[in-house]
Amino acid sequence: MNNSTDKLRNVVQLLSSLGVNIKKTKSRLEIMHTLPNTSVATPKLK
């Protein structure tokens, strides 16, 4: 499996547990713009 995909799932699961609803159809760019922490971690995943 892809590490970036795995990390993204972990982020989505974490947000879901916090009560934040994120659709799987959302693109990574949208999630990056929504979450500052994700935009910082994304370059490390590439």
Image (cartoon, rainbow, N blue to C red):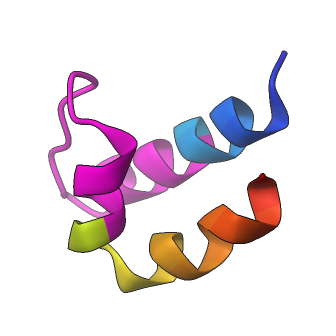
Q: What stretch is highlighted in magenta?
A: 10-32
Rendered residue at 52%/53% (across/down): 11
Lateral position of residue 6 relative to residue 2, left or right: left
Q: In which quarter of the image is the N terminus?
A: top right
Where residue 18 appears, as percent x and y from the top left, is: 30, 64
**Up/down of 4 relative to 29, above or below:** above
Where residue 36 appears, as percent x and y from the top left, is: 38, 84
Q: Residue 25 in magenta?
A: yes
Instruction: Report how many numbered discs are placed on residues in the image.
Output: 0
Rendered residue at 79%/68% (across/down): 44
Lateral position of residue 11 relative to residue 36, left or right: right
Lateral position of residue 24 relative to residue 3, left or right: left
Q: Residue 22 in magenta?
A: yes
Instruction: Pick the residue in front: 6 or 18.
Output: 6
Instruction: Pick the residue in front: 16 or 23.
Output: 23
Lateral position of residue 7 relative to residue 24, left or right: right
- Quarter of the rendering containing residue 28: top left
Farthest residue to the top: give it.
1
**Up/down of 42 relative to 36, above or below:** above
**Up/down of 46 relative to 43, above or below:** above
Rendered residue at 58%/82% (across/down): 40
Instruction: Pick the residue in front: 35 or 29.
Output: 29
- Quarter of the rendering containing residue 33: bottom left
